Image (cartoon, grey):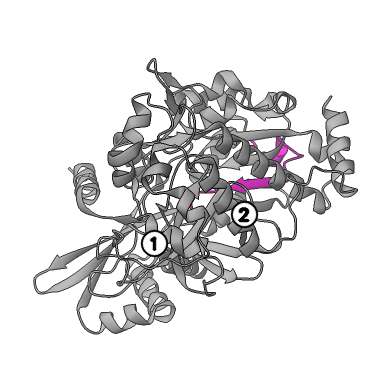
């Protein structure tokens, strides 16, 4: 079966014999987005949400884009849940999307303590499957050998086990998606349903290490930190030089969730031959973008697949100092955006989210092609005194220092705090090699001054002191386990604030006692 499928997929795509809604097409993003918005409004017009905000009137307006953003307010999770989604959780139908919501994805992001319940509809699952297939098919444009398409896909995510309370199922998005996998993918899907259902991360890790020699893996999928841990365990367990000693056909790694730059040097040591890196942008709220050109580390926004986008300039006019969106914020359509500007994304989707702040910040590098990069999170930036440091700035600075000092820095985080009458930043780097910490913080500072003019100015004014700790990598993962954040879909926050920063300081202090 695998040989037949691999040959079929390669041949079918190359001759263009793929349903029009699956194959990535050249299209006008403005027209595509107008079509998506009309479809969403029409579908949800008779829901409680649609009737409350008069979707029928919006559909009949002369300017649907402007009328929509004038009539419907902006929502974050708390306001959407408090006003609407709690009703769907209680079993009510036709709340913000037609029918009854049977699945809710549990998501806590990187900083929030309590879980969020994100509605997942059959329409959204269909959109996710469609986008996933598009990304797989996009690989056929590259010169992978034919037998590449016969190899296993090792997908390292959260537990696929779902909880059922009598009204709805809840769990990790990967679990909800796994329940809807097409039958033909079962042969390729690793680690398989039994291991994937395991809820304890360490047990799952042990099982994957045990089964690894029986798999023939061609593609890895997962968050870099946890994929790296698994590969290191396998290499150590079987006394390998690289993972290619066990999986010679491994040719591609699909990553998501965080910038891959801090991990790249470490991954190169794990591989014995070149591996193609491909980035995807799949959130609990929908499949937003993926990399279409493997020679360029940028992603293309998916504009015709059940999501309507708005973009809010990420500045003090639209967000407060804690990264909370202001109700009088100005949102832009895909027609109105500019290149190289940071935008927070609002999503309206076929899962019943409306003008919903997902929390990510992106930048368009090519407006015509809808090519984007993720630059950070609305809640994970530093601007104590106007330094406006984004995750993108931090990632680039740490990557530069890693290369200059020739060390691997896989994880890092930074916190800001008031110190007497000035302000300070405290950096924490994960490094298992000898490193001069004074030199490291000096270089980070120098790079940030080049990358960010606001930072450079404030370093001469109110931002006086920089501190740094160099910690073993396992300390970061130990903290995540202690706080219940361990597992294939979680990431360490790049910026620590509030309660999470206090927990981190207490944890670090306990290590020294």
- Where residue 407 appears, x then y in whole percent? 49, 60
Q: CA distance from mark 1 to mark 2?
A: 19 Å
Look at the image and say whether residue 247 sits in the magenta stretch. yes
Observer able to see residue 407? no
Where does the magenta region start and end? 240-259
Observer able to see residue 329? yes
- Where residue 235 appears, x then y in whole percent? 60, 36
Please identify the residue farthest to the top as the structure is shown. 166
Q: In this rendered view, identify the residue nearer to me: 473 or 126.
A: 126
Mark 2 packing: few (<14 Cα in 10 Å), some, or many (20+)? some
Residue visible at 44% across and 61% down?
67
387 relative to 65, above or below? below
- Per the image, the residue denoted by label 2 is 35
- Where residue 14 appears, x then y in whole percent? 88, 48
Q: Which quadrant holds the C terminus? A: top left
Majority SS type along the magenta span: loop
Q: Which quadrant holds the N terminus? A: top right
Look at the image and say whether residue 285 sits in the magenta stretch. no
Quadrant in the picture for residue 31:
bottom right
- Per the image, the residue denoted by label 1 is 70
Please identify the residue farthest to the left as the structure is shown. 420
Q: Is residue 372 left or right of residue 151?
A: left
Judged from the image, the secondary structure of the residue bearing numbered disc 1 is helix
């Amino acid at each position: 079966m695998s040989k037949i499928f691999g040959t079929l997929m390669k041949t079918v795509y190359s001759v263009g014999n793929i349903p029009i809604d699956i194959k990535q097409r050249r299209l006008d993003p403005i027209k595509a987005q107008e079509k998506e918005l009309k479809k969403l409004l029409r579908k949800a017009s008779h829901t409680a949400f649609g009737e409350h905000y008069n979707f029928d009137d919006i559909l009949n307006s002369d300017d649907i884009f402007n009328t929509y953003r004038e009539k419907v307010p902006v929502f974050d999770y708390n306001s959407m849940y408090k006003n609407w989604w709690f009703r769907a959780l209680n079993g009510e139908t036709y709340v913000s999307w037609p029918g009854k919501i049977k699945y809710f994805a549990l998501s806590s992001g990187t900083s929030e303590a309590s879980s969020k319940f994100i509605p997942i509809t059959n329409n959204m699952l269909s959109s996710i499957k469609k986008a996933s297939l598009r990304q797989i098919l996009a690989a056929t444009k590259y010169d992978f050998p034919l037998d590449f398409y016969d190899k296993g896909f090792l997908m390292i995510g959260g537990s696929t086990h779902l909880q059922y309370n009598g009204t709805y199922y809840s769990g990790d998005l990967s679990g909800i998606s796994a329940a809807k996998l097409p039958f033909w993918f079962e042969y390729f899907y690793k680690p398989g349903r039994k291991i994937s259902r395991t809820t304890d991360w360490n047990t799952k890790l042990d099982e994957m290490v045990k089964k690894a020699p029986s798999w023939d893996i061609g593609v890895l999928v997962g968050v870099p930190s946890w994929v790296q841990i698994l590969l290191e365990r396998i290499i150590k367990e079987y006394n390998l030089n690289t993972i290619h000693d066990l999986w010679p056909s491994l040719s591609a790694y699909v990553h998501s969730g965080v910038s891959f730059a801090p991990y790249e040097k470490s991954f190169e040591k794990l591989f014995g031959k070149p591996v193609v890196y491909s980035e995807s942008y799949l959130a609990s709220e929908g499949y937003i973008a993926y990399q279409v050109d493997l020679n360029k580390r940028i992603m293309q926004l998916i504009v015709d697949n059940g999501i309507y986008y708005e973009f809010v300039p990420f500045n003090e006019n639209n967000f407060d100092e804690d990264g909370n969106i202001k109700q009088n914020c100005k949102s832009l359509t895909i027609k109105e955006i500019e290149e190289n500007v940071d935008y927070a994304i609002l999503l309206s989707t076929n899962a019943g989210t409306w003008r919903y702040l997902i929390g990510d910040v992106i930048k368009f590098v090519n407006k015509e092609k809808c090519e984007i990069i993720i630059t950070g999170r609305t809640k994970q930036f530093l601007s104590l005194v106007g330094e406006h440091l984004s995750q993108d700035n931090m990632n680039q600075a740490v990557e530069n220092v890693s290369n200059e000092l020739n060390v691997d820095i896989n994880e890092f985080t930074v916190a800001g705090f008031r110190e007497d009458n000035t302000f300070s930043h405290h950096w924490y780097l994960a490094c298992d090699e000898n490193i001069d910490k004074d030199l490291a913080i000096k270089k980070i500072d120098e790079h940030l001054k080049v990358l960010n003019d606001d930072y450079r100015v404030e370093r001469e004014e109110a931002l006086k002191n920089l501190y740094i700790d160099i910690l073993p990598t396992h300390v970061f993962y130990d903290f995540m386990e202690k706080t219940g954040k361990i597992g294939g879909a979680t990431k360490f926050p790049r910026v620590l604030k509030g309660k999470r920063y206090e927990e981190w300081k207490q944890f670090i202090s306990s290590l020294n006692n």
